[in-house]
Amino acid sequence: MVFECIRRHGPIARVDVANDTGISPATVTAIVAEMIEEGLVEESPDVEAETGKKRGRPRVYLKIRGEAHLVGGLKIAHRSISTVITNFEGEQIAKRETPLARTSHETAELAERCAEAIEETAKDAGLDAADLSAVGVGMAGLIDANRGFVHWSPSLLSRNVAIAPALSERLKSPVFVDNDANLVAMAERLFGRGRDVDDFLVVTIENGVGIGIVLGGQIYRGVRGCGAEFGHTKVQLDGALCRCGQRGCLEAYVADYALVREASVAYPTNDSIDPVHAVETLISDAKKGVQPAQTIVARAARMFGMGLANLVNIFDPELILLAGERMHLDHLYEEEIQSSIRNLTVEVDAPPPKIVIHKSSDEMWAMGAAAFAISGVTELSLRKRRNHAA
Amino acid sequence: MVFECIRRHGPIARVDVANDTGISPATVTAIVAEMIEEGLVEESPDVEAETGKKRGRPRVYLKIRGEAHLVGGLKIAHRSISTVITNFEGEQIAKRETPLARTSHETAELAERCAEAIEETAKDAGLDAADLSAVGVGMAGLIDANRGFVHWSPSLLSRNVAIAPALSERLKSPVFVDNDANLVAMAERLFGRGRDVDDFLVVTIENGVGIGIVLGGQIYRGVRGCGAEFGHTKVQLDGALCRCGQRGCLEAYVADYALVREASVAYPTNDSIDPVHAVETLISDAKKGVQPAQTIVARAARMFGMGLANLVNIFDPELILLAGERMHLDHLYEEEIQSSIRNLTVEVDAPPPKIVIHKSSDEMWAMGAAAFAISGVTELSLRKRRNHAA
């Protein structure tokens, strides 16, 4: 918590870390001392006092030590891998986009693709993959981040894969894996719209529908590490068939594949339809009022609005961020969604949560993965230090 | 947090309070000193050491000081008010059930009914209402507990009522008001099944469907104080009409009034049907396989299962407790619900959350209200003390 606070607000004085986290000043001082000795955090001069802008004794500020470690961040998308390398302050040093020939992979094959992507990105920056202290990975699916374990992911052909150890062995460095929507939420919390908001949700819509839940400033993951599952919540009993095999999932109405399924009926002649193109055509036709494109998109928007309204009813959050690829296509969609939410949330005479569309690139997601790796490195080095002491 | 920990685990040593809460031992000692001076907490002898069951230096334990204050707890139900009086340890001193002539009230009238209920209960115990240091009140609806403000409640004819000040003026003591399902969750956390579980949900089904969300040991209330709304989450776009005026709410399928609505079609001759009786008849007929009773109850159960499955998908909690009146009617219902949940939650090779039916009386809900009053009194006296010091 101390590290996250310095990362979000640094340069920051020790007393403000104590105030912000609710941890006692003595404990903050002790933890900071450990982190300074480990080289993770450094003291930073009081610029205002030094330049004479402020009177009185200069205060000592804390900040993350950028050169402490280099880390990699990786987002495994539908048909590509986005990679970044950042310093310990999260400043980007290199980035790269690598295409993937297919969507689902054998574990060893995916590890190979990830390793190649990281190696190429390192090379771009005149580095070696071995220079990275850790790699963070975001992927879609049901992922237990504590164990780096994939219950299920659309990117993997097998279920129940201990993915972090597999990647770690190939990459020769610690690997931290989380659900990709959680990592967008982490990126928003550290660098984006969630910086000053303690309770917010990030909902992503692209090939699937994801959610990251931030409560009290922390990512909420559930007990088995498979919580925060939104795309497979049910919006219709015995409804449309979903990729997961169940019926009536939100995804089965709003995800790309669901729109493509409808498009294949709407545009039957176009039989070898390219998914990305089909969805774009559908939405652009819908905007022009062409039927049945319009009715297809309108239903998807209303179903999505219903799902979001349920989140508002349950969480009553300060903010919901809508992120992801599909958010690039938008307007008609957006209005339908917003009006569904208004009509389907419980009525109170208090302003509803802000719902903000924050189009985020795969690069942003990879930055979230790098941020996760930074947290991981910090925990590892403090734990190692304490084990030494004990 | 320190108080809640002592209340849940006392008698407990200071060091264990620090371990359990994550608050530094020095801070725990300082807070405990304040609470002892205020007479809220007391030291308790080490019984095991004194009786020779344990060797070594006797430890000092902390417990709530039962005689510190008396409080009232009140649950406003559909057609009755349940009242308890407890000491500061939450031990029951008196209880009473007072019938209500109607369901919805003017604010002043409801305040009058509550005051009478409290006065009568006090009299039963040879006390006066003025002996109570505070009263906790639980009622259905959208309630901002921080402000004691009712956005909407089925028990009140008006919206936007500052109910706590209104009751406080009539009762001449501080009043703390919360959503009734939150208070059941609090009771379960303090005295019941949630004692050793940090993340759990309590779902109540009676006239409406309620939820109490406990995350990290704390009740989650949302930003505007109208979160944790489950009964009006939508399970069907443009579905059955709900009392709230919207369509497709979970309540519109599973609450008493929804079953009565269906029963009025199933049993058309019985035109002045008594709600409680109608639901009982319906469920008993359904168990015998009588149609259409069976199909009515089966759909309600499946819809309820779908709603619960969505909660499992989102929260991945350790435990869900099903509480409330409707849980008395049960079995057929229960199996349908459990199987719906199994079929509609995302599949992982890890055991699903425990779903436990914990039939709880209105008295249990009133005990939760009393517990809420105890927390309120504690906060008030520590705040008063600090204001004095400042």
Image (cartoon, coloured by chain):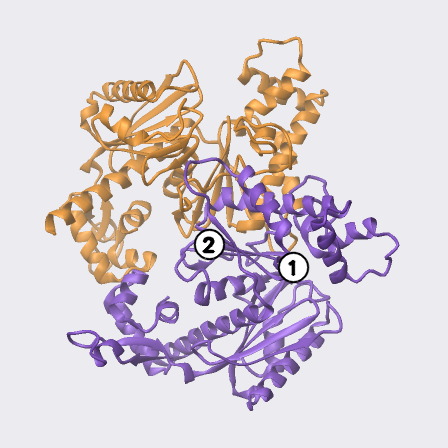
Chain colours: A orange, B purple
User: Residue B180 occupies which quadrant of the picture?
Assistant: bottom right
Q: Which amino acid lies under the numbered mark 1 shown in the image of this protein? A: Glu
Residue B308 on image: x %, y %: 56, 47
Residue at 73%, 67% in the rendered image: B104
Quarter residue A186 falls in: top left
Q: Tell me, yes or no, if residue B247 can be seen here.
A: yes
From this view, report whether residue B97 is shown above or below residue A281: below
User: Label 2 lies in what chain?
Assistant: B
Residue occupying the far right of the picture: B269
| Residue ID for mark 2 | B200
The residue drawn where x is 39% and y is 76% is: B382
Q: Neighbour class for label 1 at 10 Å: few (<14), some, many (≥20)?
A: some
Q: Secondary structure at mark 1?
A: loop
Label 2 element class: strand
The CA span between labels 1 and 2 is 20 Å
Q: Which quadrant of the view contains residue A54?
A: bottom left
Nearest to the observer: residue B165 or residue B102: B102
- Looking at the rendered structure, which numbered label has been put on residue A127? none
Tell me the chain of label 1.
B
The image shows residue B260 at horizontal and vertical percentages of: 76, 55
Identify the mark nearer the N-term, 1 or 2. 2
Outermost residue on the front side: it is: B288
From the top left corner, tell me how far across and down residue A247 is, in percent: 60, 31
Whether residue B234 is visible here, answered yes or no, is: no
Horizontal and vertical percent position of residue A333: 62, 31
What amino acid is at disc 2?
Answer: Phe
Find disc 1 in the rendering and name its residue: B206
